[in-house]
Structure formats: C-alpha cells, structure tokens
Amino acid sequence: MRKSILIIIYKKTLTYLVIASILAFLVPYAFVKATNEKRISPATPLTGKIIVIDPGHGGVDSGTHYGQKILEKDINLKIGLILKTAIQAQGATVFMTRESDISLDDQKKNGSRHREDLNARVRLTNTSNADIFISIHANYIRNSSSTLGPMVFYYGSSEKSKQLAESIQQSLNTLSGYKKVGTKASHSAHKGNYVILRETMPPGVLVETGFLSNAIDRTLLQKESHQQEIAKLITEGLIRYFKHPEDIH
C-alpha cells in the first residue's frame, strides 16, 4: 500500500516537473513574440503611393529671380529635395523630374527649348504610374510687392486635383513664418491652365511657394527652416487628401 502511494506521488511530481519545464520554455517565447509584435510599425500613411515631385525650371532656365543671386530654380530644387525626404518617410515611392541643376530639354535646338522641357516633365509624370504629382515653383508679380504667401493651383476640370490643391493650401495657410513677422498669408486654391497641369494624367497641383517680389517671402524662402516647414505642410496636405478627405475645407 505504502509502495503504491509513493509511486502515485512520484508520478504526480514528475507530471508537475514536466508541466513546469514546458511553461518555463513557453512563457519567455510568448513574451519575446509579444514584444517583437509591438515593435512592428504600423503602415505609414503614404505606403503604396507613388508621387512625382517636379522642381520647376533648372539649368539655363532660372525661372523668375530677384537680382542675380536669388533664383527660382534653386529654391524649387531645395524644397523639392526636402519634400522628397519627407514624403518617403511616410512610406511613399517618389520620382523626381530633376535632382540637380539641369533642364530637361533635349539640347538639340529643334524647336522651343522651354516647350521641350515641359514635354519631358509631362512624359516623366505620365509614365510613372503616379497617384499624384506636385510641381514646385516660386512666384513674382511685377509692380506689386505686397502680395505674399504660397498659392496652390489645379487644372479646372479635375475634381481630384481640386481636392488635392485645397488640402495642401489648407496646410500651407498655417505657415508660422508670417505670424512671426506680424503678418498673415492666407489664400484659396486657384484654377490654373498650365501645361504641366493640363497635359498630365494623374491628379496634380502646382505650388507657388511664395513671391520673390515680396521682401518677406524673399527672406523666408531662403531660410532652410522655412523650406522644411513648407515640405512638412505639403506632406500633411497629402496625408489628409489620401486618408482624411472629410477634413478638407
């Protein structure tokens, strides 16, 4: 009888030891698995999107300018490259029409150099399978130095382009640089009959980031912090367009 009891106790003890060993293995595994799952980042807001960024002008084409040193093409490229980094950080695939100081014409003098440059930008956009495109520019108004602030243009017949323009304009109207100097720059999105808007297939906008004819804009557009904020706000406008269109007003 006593021997039978000892055998039962031994079997129970052995069972407990086996269970304890299994738990000792599984619990740390479960903890590591749960910890690793927490470390997996959720999909970024622009994951899967293809976006074309077009820094306007370049090479022999300086765009508008103020004096000999403040050239639109340089400002466009700086903002375009910052915007590329900002959009990529949100998961998008980005194609640039240019990433250096070049023009996109064929250099053959077989027609309008300006028109060939625009045609090349249109071709790049239309063959990229892009969801949207953004053309970056700076503005200038002759005989008027009071107008300032970014303005976003879209082609009139495209409802999606209009919605994109309104979303980006909504963000750019919050630029902090104007408030810091005691002024305000707020605009509505505008229709624009530009080649780069009219002849490209995906929804797109042309962003005039400010006016080189205005002293405040001229100063701000040369500051890296202002360029970075423009890129940040354009990116916010893109995310709103894709993820929260109900918040566009």
Image (tube, rainbow, N blue to C red):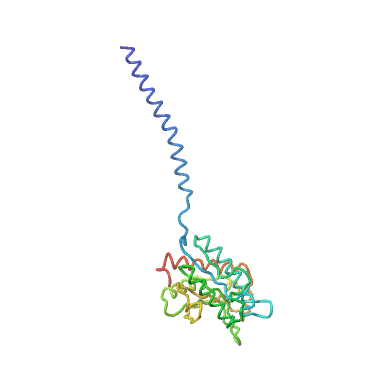
Q: Please provide percent x and percent y for residue 189.
A: 47, 77
Looking at the image, which residue is at 59% across and 86% down?
A: 144
- Nearest the camera: 149 or 68? 68
Quarter the N terminus occupies: top left
Asked if 14 appears above or below 153 in the picture, the reply is: above
- Nearest the camera: 134 or 116? 116
Quarter the C terminus occupies: bottom left
Asked if 111 appears above or below 133 in the picture, the reply is: below
Q: Is residue 242 left or right of residue 54?
A: left
- Nearest the camera: 17 or 51? 51
Q: Please provide percent x and percent y for residue 80.
A: 57, 69
- Which residue is situated farthest in the left direction here? 1
- Which residue is situated farthest in the bottom direction here? 143
Q: Please provide percent x and percent y for residue 78.
A: 61, 69
Looking at the image, which residue is at 62% across and 69% down?
A: 100
Q: How many marks?
A: 0
Q: Is residue 61 left or right of residue 52?
A: right
Q: Please provide percent x and percent y for residue 171.
A: 50, 70
Question: Residue 97 falls in which quadrant of the image?
Answer: bottom right
Looking at the image, which residue is at 68% across and 80% down?
A: 67
